[in-house]
Amino acid sequence: MFHANKDCAEVRERVFKALHEVDFGFQCIVARKKLSIFRNQYGLRPAELYKDLVSRLMKNRAHLNKEIDCYFSSMQNVVRRENMELAIRKATERFARAWGKEHNNNVRVIIQKSSELYALQAVDYILWAVYQAFEHGEFRYYNYIRDKVDLIIDVFDSTSSIHGTYYSKKNPLTPEKMSPL
C-alpha cells in the first residue's frame, strides 16, 4: 500500500512519475483549518464537515452520468456509507436548487480501505501534494501533477466569492494567489 506521507522519497518519486503518465482528471475541495467555522457551522463534528464538503464537491458532478460509483476511503466514524449517501443526496438537492433541474441518477457509495483500491492511493498522493501547497507553501509536488488537477475549491477562502475561491487550469493555484490562513 502506498501512502504519500509515510513513503520514503524514492517511492514517492516513482508514484508521482507513474501518476504523471496516467490519463485522469482530479477535483478536490479544501477546507482551511478555521476553528470558528468548525465550531459554528459543524458543531465540532468532523463527520458533519466531511459530509458538507463531499456535498459541495459533488453538487455539479453527480448528474453527469446515469450510474456513478463513489469510492470513499474509510475513516472510522467520519466516513460511513449512511453519511456519504446523505452527502450525495444533499449534492443533488443543491444542484436542483441552483439549476432548477432534478436528476434521478443511481449513485452508489462504496466505502473501502485505501489498501484495497489503488485509485484511493492515487487520490491520497494528489491530496497530499495539494496539502503540501496549502499547509507548507511547498509547490514542487503539486506543480509536477498540476496538469491532472481540473479544480480545487478553497471553500473557506471568501476573498473572491462567498462560495470560496476556485482554482482551475485557467486559474491555477499559485503561491501568489493563495490568501493567508
Image (cartoon, grey):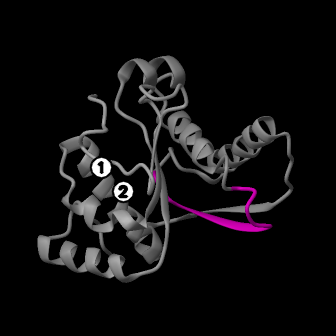
Give above or below for 178 relative to 82: above
Nearest the camera: 134 or 121?
A: 134
Q: Is 178 rendered above or below residue 75? A: above
Q: Residues within 10 Å of mark 1 (few under 14, many from 20)?
A: some
Q: Residue at x 27, y 79 (%)?
A: 17
Q: Secondary structure at mark 2?
A: helix
> Residue most toward the left?
9
User: Which stretch appears magenta?
Assistant: 62-75
* Tag 1–tag 2 contact (CB < 8 Å): yes
The x, y position of residue 51, in whole percent, is: 58, 41
Identify the disc placed on residue 127. 2
What is the number of the mark on residue 30?
A: none
Q: Where is 77 relative to 106, above or below? A: above
**Pointer 1: what residue?**
131
Q: CA distance from mark 1 to mark 2?
A: 6 Å
- Dot 1 falls on a residue whose secondary structure is helix
Query: On the rendered structure, is 144 left or right of 168?
Result: left
Q: Report if residue 165 lies within the magenta region.
A: no
Image quadrant where one finds the N terminus:
bottom left
| Picture quadrant of residue 127 | bottom left
Q: Residue 97: percent from the left, percent from the top?
A: 79, 35
- Residue visible at 32% across and 53% down? 130
